[in-house]
Image (cartoon, grey):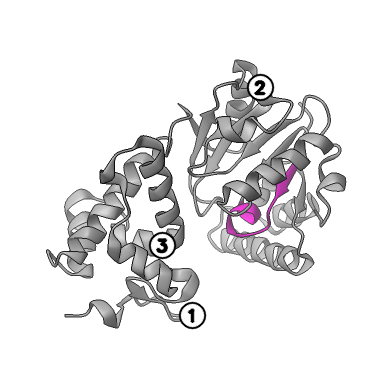
Amino acid sequence: MSQKISVIGAGTMGNGIAHVFAQNGFSVTLIDISSQQLEKAMATISKNLDRQITKGSLSEVEKKSTLSNIKTETDIKTGIREAAIVVEAASENIDLKLKIFQQMDEAAPAGCILASNTSSISITKIASVTKRPGLVIGMHFMNPVPVMKLVEIINGYATTQETSDKIIAVSKQLGKIPCAVNDYPGFIANRILMPMINEAIYSLYEGVAGVEEIDNIMKLGMAHPMGPLQLADFIGLDICHSILNVLHKGLGNPKYAPCPLLTNMVTAGYLGVKSSEGFYKYISGSKELTVSERFKR
């Protein structure tokens, strides 16, 4: 398989995906409609590579090589015309993803695999708007991509075994551990994670315990590296809300409905780290974790 990879979307996930492919010798085209976002993404990749150098896991020569493996492009058609794999990492919005996949299908070479980094949207639905459903697959990386080992591989209803085998092999080339699952709402990662986060929010909403108590019980009692409320802030409360709605609609079970507290926070713009406040308050440059005034007892 060609070592040419295209990544669509230069946000947090897109720049992380481009980073790991480039670091492992792939020729990467990072695509975004915003040239400013592309500049920001390249600066983030450089900064993250510097962190690896500080930790002793990367050399200056390897950093230079990684950056030289990445080029940027604002036009999808130009950016994917020679790709063997295109990984879409745009916002978790089904209409946007369907539109992008139609464009990818029209412009990508025959035989090119079209992958989505979606965390909840049906791969079968995405594949249905293309003329190559057998070559459409989910490649769900975890955040932060350069650090987290898991790649959740989602096989759509029409995804061929050959496509799945190729993406599993590529994931291993990246030093990741691929886990293949089938295409049902939430897949595995979010079908299990999101109800836990939602239950933690309900526990806060109903006054069972405070923010720190809920998170500390899960960290100290269940060996979780991060409590569910802090993790929700890190993921983005809007993303959590969206995924829960996908689970609720797709599985038809009221237990997946987002907690009213989560709905109110998203409506009011308290989205977690990205908005500087969620269950905790985030101050730029500070590593101290402070509970939001709204939840202090």
Q: Identify the residue at horizontal 23%, vertical 53% (top origin).
A: 199
| Residue under numbered circle 3 | 237
What span is colored magenta in the figure?
4-16
Reading the chain from its start, which is encountered first: label 1 or label 2? 2
SS type, badge 2? helix
Q: Please tell me which residue lies in front, 181 or 55.
A: 181
Residue 103 image offset from top left, x and y in percent: 77, 42
SS type, badge 3? helix
| Residue under numbered circle 2 | 134
Residue 136 image offset from top left, x and y in percent: 65, 29
User: Label 1 neighbourhood size at 10 Å, few (<14), some (14-19), many (20+)?
Assistant: few
Relative to residue 172, is residue 272 drawn left or right?
left
12 magenta-colored: yes
Which mark lies nearer to you, 1 or 2? 2
* Residues at marks 3 and 1, CA–CA distance in whole angstroms: 21 Å
Reading the chain from its start, which is encountered first: label 3 or label 2? 2
Q: Which amino acid, mark 3?
A: Leu
Q: Quadrant of the C terminus?
A: bottom left
Reading the chain from its start, which is encountered first: label 3 or label 1? 3
Q: Please tell me which residue lies in front, 60 or 199.
A: 199
Q: Identify the residue at horizontal 65%, vertical 50% (top origin).
A: 96
Residue most extreme to the top: 161
Relative to residue 18, is residue 195 drawn left or right?
left
* Residues at marks 1 and 2, CA–CA distance in whole angstroms: 46 Å
Observer able to see residue 250: yes
Q: Please tell me which residue lies in front, 54 or 215.
A: 215
Q: Please tell me which residue lies in front, 212 or 20.
A: 212
| Residue under numbered circle 1 | 285
Quadrant assignment, res 59: bottom right
Relative to residue 35, is residue 202 drawn left or right?
left
SS type, badge 1? loop
Q: Which amino acid, mark 1?
A: Gly
